[in-house]
Image (tube, rainbow, N blue to C red):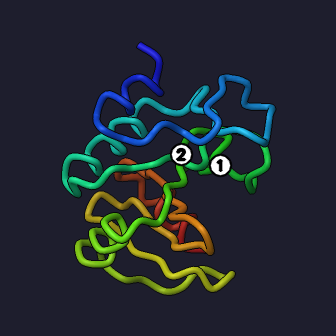
Amino acid sequence: MHRTAVLSGLGNGAPRGSCSNRNNPSCTSLEQVNAATISDVTTLRRASTCALTITGGTETGHASGTYSHWNGYKIDFSPTSCVGNYITGSFTRIANRCDGAARYRSSAGNVYAREGNHWDVTFCWGSAACTKAARA
């Protein structure tokens, strides 16, 4: 089943300008997103009971790195009050990112950074190296 269909079936908003060509920076692609990332997105959806609108996936145009959007570790979400209240009320506040973005860490090691117009989430699946990298 296509990853977008899996997410839409859980009550998430459709990815912005959803497309399968991840070389197109003007639309959101979930092509080659990690299956564990999708699993953690569905866990977030169920635990928060919030609708999640994906605004960034594996498309080109994001920062590079091992635990990057391109490599399937990161997803961006619209910053609704429901999502924001769940993240800030459920996860541990950690030091701001070097660009000033406020960050929160889940018990699973996922890191949620509040950027200007979205939540930038690194799904680490328990990897200490990933969580450490997402703290930079």
Q: Nearer the viewer, residue 6 or 131?
A: 6
Give the position of the C terminus as an image quadrant: bottom right
Give the quadrant of residue 25.
top right
| Label placed on residue 73 | 2
Instruction: Compute the Cα span from label 2 to label 1.
Output: 9 Å
Q: Is residue 2 above or below residue 38?
A: above
Of labels 2 and 1, earlier in sequence is: 1
**Does 120 appear above or below 31?**
below
On screen, residue 88 versus residue 71, left or right, reads: left
Residue plotted at (42% across, 83% down)? 94
Say which residue appears at 27% left-offset and 69% top-offset.
86
Q: Position of residue 62 (x, y in %)?
A: 74, 52
At label 2, the amino acid type is Tyr
Q: Residue visible at 28% across and 34% down?
A: 10
Which numbered mark, 2 or 1, is in the foreground of this view? 2
Neighbour tally class for label 1: few under 14, some 14-19, many 20 plus, Cα within 10 Å: few
Which residue in the structure is indicated by mark 1? 66
Q: Are marks 2 and 1 in contact (CB under 8 Å)?
A: yes
Q: Position of residue 71 (x, y in %)?
A: 63, 39
Residue at (58%, 80%) from the top-left corner? 101
Image quadrant holding the N terminus, namely top left
Indicate the position of residue 79 as horizontal and vertical percent values.
47, 66
Q: What type is the residue that disc 1 sits on?
A: Thr
